[in-house]
């Protein structure tokens, strides 16, 4: 499968948006290019279960895949689009059943791996086995979003239900990572051996909090502390989607009950342990361990603290989020950079002084102000180094210095911003939050667990 043109349903969406954006931003051509990027350059494999590469890496990440394809939910009235997206959900569900701890998979059992020094060695179908909570969140959430956008249940089959059950089971195990987890990750040699988790691959110590443990961030960098707060928030939203699908009879009722109980526990864990008092009011920490350790930072990759409303965890005007957002977009975040060309959030994954277009897109979509979103959109247009598409990161004083010339997920996030500014229906569909979960979420900030956070 190698589509070289957009289906009619998607072309109509982007043409309408481009026509509306051109007079104000002169952005029609860039929007079309970025919107089409994932569809025309990253889809491959079997037509019934497409393989989605990240762009310049020949592997499929669940999280990146969903981020790349989410704008296409706007075109699911086109049967070709619905067929492709449904096939992607089925492929991801199959990958979860094969190895739920894998963060990236191959197009079949090719034996290709990110690094030859990983222990335990990945199976032939696995590219890399850095366990990340958000990888599993993406599978659950996209299954729900496709159903909500199209009404189709074809992708929510027995395999998806089995993958859902396995995800819930794994998240339960990883609530008690210290005693119950079978997961280990070591990279025993080579230039990236720093990815090895401490204590023989188990990771740094954590206490039981109600949250579920993650070895790695969405950047694929290892966690400093095992409870990644934005990933746990994303997990609650994903669990809410399972509850809703079960209530509608699309998934088995027992999955909905299990998801509800787990969502309440994870949300309560965030409220009790994921909120810290900085002296200027409570904010969300990026990572915590339940033992008093907290990491006050944010990373450009999604899920992030900046992205919490985009994920569906909270409203844009939530006071705790607003305080957190202000800290993230300031010198309080060691990965926030200011320069002559841009200011925004970067990542320890890329060189110092590099801001990510992805974070600028998320900032635009969580601002609550069209004026701010439009200004950020103009910054994105002005910092593409003349390439007409987004990069992984660029230097805040010199946009011609950038990483990854081909980064389909950033292109898709830019397209989401463009669709919103154009007034075209935005493809971000959030499940309703059950009252029991909402009660746990709304206690965040009222019981601050860590008073003297460590960076």
Image: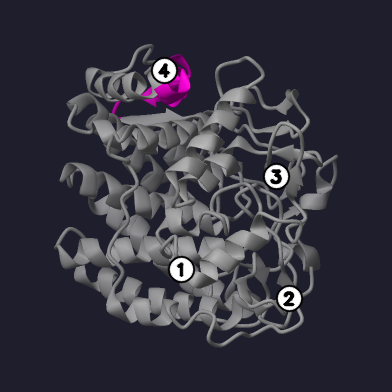
Q: Quadrant of the N terminus?
A: top left
Q: Residues within 10 Å of mark 1 (few under 14, many from 20)?
A: few
Question: Which residue does the numbered mark 1 point to in the structure image?
Answer: 318
Query: 258 or 7: which is nearer to us?
Result: 7
Q: Please name the residue that numbered disc 4 is placed on.
A: 28
Q: How many marks?
A: 4
User: Is 143 within the magenta?
Assistant: no
Q: Which residue in the rendered view is the most extreme toward the bottom?
A: 447
Specify the quadrant of the image occupied by residue 236.
bottom left
Quadrant of the rendered image containing residue 154: top left
Left-right relation of 256 to 142: left
Q: Residues within 10 Å of mark 4 (few under 14, many from 20)?
A: many
Residue span colored magenta: 24-48
Q: Which residue is mark 2?
A: 205
Residue corresponding to mark 3: 346
Residue mark closest to the camera, 3 vs 4: 4
Question: Helix, strand, or loop for circle 2?
Answer: loop
Q: Secondary structure at mark 4?
A: helix
Q: Work out how far the residue at label 3 is from the one at label 1, CA to CA, in angstroms.
A: 24 Å
Mark 2 or 4: in front is 4
Q: Earlier in the sequence, mark 1 or mark 2?
A: 2
Q: Position of residue 416 (x, y in %)?
A: 41, 36
């Amino acid at each position: 499968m190698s589509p070289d043109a957009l289906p009619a349903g998607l072309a109509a969406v982007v043409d309408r948006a481009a026509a509306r954006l051109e007079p104000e931003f002169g952005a029609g051509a860039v929007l079309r290019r970025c919107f089409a990027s994932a569809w025309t350059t990253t889809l491959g494999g079997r037509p019934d279960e497409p393989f989605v590469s990240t762009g310049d890496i020949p592997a499929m990440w669940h999280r990146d895949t969903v981020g790349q394809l989410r704008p296409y939910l706007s075109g699911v009235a086109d049967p070709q689009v619905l067929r492709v997206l449904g096939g992607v959900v089925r492929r991801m569900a199959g990958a979860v059943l094969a190895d739920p701890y894998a963060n990236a998979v191959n197009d079949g059992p090719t034996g290709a791996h990110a690094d030859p020094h990983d222990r335990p060695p990945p199976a032939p179908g696995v590219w890399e086995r850095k366990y990340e909570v958000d990888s599993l969140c993406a599978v659950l959430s996209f299954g729900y979003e496709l159903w909500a956008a199209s009404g189709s249940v074809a992708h929510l089959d027995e395999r998806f239900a089995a993958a859902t059950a396995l995800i819930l089971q794994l998240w339960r195990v990883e609530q008690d990572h210290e005693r119950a987890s079978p997961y280990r990750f070591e990279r025993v040699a080579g230039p990236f051996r720093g990815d090895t988790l401490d204590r023989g691959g188990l990771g740094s110590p954590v206490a039981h909090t109600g949250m579920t443990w993650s070895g790695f961030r969405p950047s694929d960098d290892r966690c400093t502390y095992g409870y990644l707060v934005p990933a746990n928030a994303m997990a609650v939203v994903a669990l809410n989607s399972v509850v809703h699908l079960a209530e509608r009879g699309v998934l088995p009722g027992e999955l909905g009950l299990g998801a509800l109980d787990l969502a309440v526990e994870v949300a309560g864990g965030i409220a009790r342990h994921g909120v810290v008092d900085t002296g200027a009011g409570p904010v969300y920490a990026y990572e915590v361990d339940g033992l008093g350790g907290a990491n006050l930072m944010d990373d450009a990759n999604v899920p992030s603290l900046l992205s919490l409303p985009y994920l569906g965890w909270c409203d844009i005007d939530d006071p705790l989020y607003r305080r957190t957002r202000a800290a993230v977009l300031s010198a309080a975040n060691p990965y926030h950079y200011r320069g002559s060309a841009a200011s925004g959030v970067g990542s320890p994954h890329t060189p110092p002084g590099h801001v990510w277009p992805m974070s600028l897109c998320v900032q635009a979509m969580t601002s609550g102000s069209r004026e701010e979103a439009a200004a950020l959109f103009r910054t994105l247009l002005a910092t593409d180094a003349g390439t007409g598409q987004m990069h992984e990161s660029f230097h805040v004083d010199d946009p011609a210095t950038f990483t990854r010339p081909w980064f389909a997920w950033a292109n898709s996030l830019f397209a989401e911003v463009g669709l919103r500014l154009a007034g075209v229906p935005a493809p971000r569909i959030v499940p309703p939050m059950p009252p029991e979960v909402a009660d746990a979420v709304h206690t965040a900030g009222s019981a601050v667990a860590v008073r003297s956070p460590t960076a």
